[in-house]
Amino acid sequence: MNENQLLKQLIKLEELLQTSKIKRDLNYTDDLNQTNQEILNLENKISEVETQLINCTDKTDSENAKFSIIDQFQKYIDEIGKKPNYLHLSRSQSMIKNIVFGLICKDIYYLVQDKVYGIHIPKYLIYTSNPEDSVNNRELIDFLSSEIAIVKSITKPDYVQLRQYFEEFKDRMFNKFM
């Protein structure tokens, strides 16, 4: 199997694991022991597929994903940097509070969940002068720049590393801006 096929298999197994855990936790199963065994089997299969992803010889897709993550962050930096200093990026984007961080995460999430087919250019970001609904542009640019440095430091990327990076990125963003 190639890297992308392994990634898809991993995602499918993770979805099955989540479903099995929900069935167990909500008691939607006739045989709890069987469900627990299924969960254990799925966890073992996930571990095997992760090992195969790590050991995969052709990592072209994950290399492309790494560089696309860097490009995606850079697109946000470029777009945010174009605005005058008195306008700040709107947290709500005229929708719900802090959605701008969800949009950034969503763009990175797509890059670590499948073969990269392109990146999103955040052309239509909304800016505001309202301090209650704003993110300091310089602070966000500095944060995204530091994320670029972290991604660049991944010397031999694979999807297991990139997905772990994404989870850590979400935590850092949440802790910094929420």
Image (spheres, helix red, strand yellow):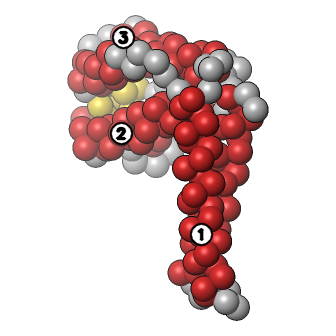
Quadrant where the N terminus lies?
A: top right
The residue that disc 3 covers is 81
The structure residue drawn at horizontal position 53% and vertical position 81%, both measured from the top left corner, is 25
The residue under label 2 is 168
**Residue 70: % across, % down:** 46, 15
Q: Image check: 20 left or right of 125?
A: right
Q: Quadrant of residue 80?
A: top left
Q: Residue at x 58, y 78 (%)?
A: 36
Residue ID at (51%, 36%): 160
Residue 22: % across, % down:
59, 74
Q: Nearer the viewer, residue 7 or 166?
A: 7
**Crowd band around label 2 with a 10 angstrom C-alpha radius: few (<14), some (14–19), many (20+):** few
Q: CA distance from mark 3 to mark 1?
A: 47 Å
Mark 2 vs mark 1, foreground winner is: 1
Q: Earlier in the sequence, mark 2 or mark 3?
A: 3
Query: SS class of the residue under badge 3?
Result: helix
